[in-house]
Image: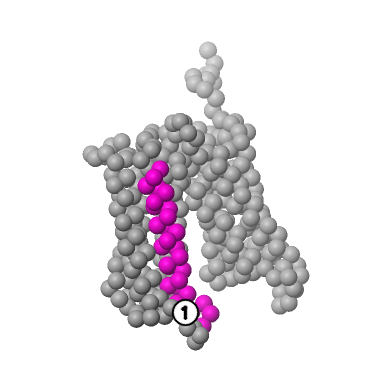
Amino acid sequence: MSMMESTGGPYLNTAAVTSPVGIVRLLQMMFGCTTFSLVAHQGGFSAAYGTFCMFVWTFCFAVTVFIITCEFTHLHSCLSISWGNFTAAFAMLATLMSVTAAVIYPLYFVQLGCYPITCEVRDFRIAASVFAGLVFIVYGAEVFLTRAKPGQVTSYMATVSGLLKIVQAFVACIIFGALVNDSQYSKYVATQWCVAVYSFCFMVTVVVVAFSVTGKTAHLCFPFERSVVVYTFGAVLLYVSAAVIWPVFCFDSKYGSPQRPSACAKGRCPWDSQLVVAIFTYVNLLLYVVDLAYSQRIRFVSHI
């Protein structure tokens, strides 16, 4: 008998690059690499906005390469995580991050004229913006292809409720960004309560995602699925309180200003940050309500 005789299945999983999801991931890798290469070579970036965009493209590219490599070589079976939950969570996160970068980069770096930059740099920035949009499209396509279908047994993070957990955490990060940008949240105890609501819900949502991705939900000493539903209901109540309190203490004439002060500098106005917080508070409230409606209709599967 040959020393090289196989004792199991094939060593390489060709479906990882030939299936619809595999092809989409190859496009993610190609478009992502093209985008940050165009920016790094000639397009250029600066300040926190440009650095964020470069981080998004390089981070998503690196994780996508890792996922393709693991699935192609079956190495993901050696990892002590729920692979289905991990890939579904990353696809949703990458979609949100890439659409943000696809909006920010052209908004701050693309212009029609060539002054004060050269026409060559302008063309590179336009090309990078086009590929940034393609990056968002292909990550969104993976979410669409891998989402849970009615009656299908799949990983929790591929369900509507699981995907919403990623969106909720992402929206909370936007709220935190506005809060630290001179939002004057420490002015009243009531607005500090709102910050506590945002922080608590964000932390618990991250814990839910972490337990799902690591596949440890079956090892807990309490019913995880029921606890998630109870938490989601509590989060709805907490966000309702924040949705009422924050606008009152920021935009009521007794505590704040109903209109944007004329003396406020662009980009450095507390009123602008307060408005962003208010808008995304209502966005997250809606997300938690939808999550509550869906979370009662699913069953957790930790080993997929």
Task: Assess whether residue 293 is covered by the magenta stretch.
Answer: yes
Residue 210 location (% of width, % of height): 37, 47
The residue drawn where x is 68% and y is 64% is 125
Disc 1 designates what residue? Answer: 259
Residue 218 location (% of width, % of height): 31, 36
From this viewpoint, is residue 51 visible? yes
Q: Amino acid at mark 1?
A: Gln
Relative side of 211 to 60, left or right: left
Relative side of 55 to 208, left or right: right
Quadrant position of residue 40: bottom right
The residue drawn where x is 58% and y is 70% is 46
Residue 274 location (% of width, % of height): 42, 72
- Which residue occupies the foreground of this view, 102 or 273? 273
Relative side of 231 to 21, left or right: left
In the image, residue 124 above or below residue 64: below
Relative side of 227 to 286, left or right: left
Helix, strand or loop under label 1: loop
The residue drawn where x is 34% and y is 44% is 211
Q: Residues within 10 Å of mark 1 (few under 14, many from 20)?
A: few
In the image, residue 298 above or below residue 100: above
The residue range painted magenta reads 265-294
Residue 108 location (% of width, % of height): 61, 70
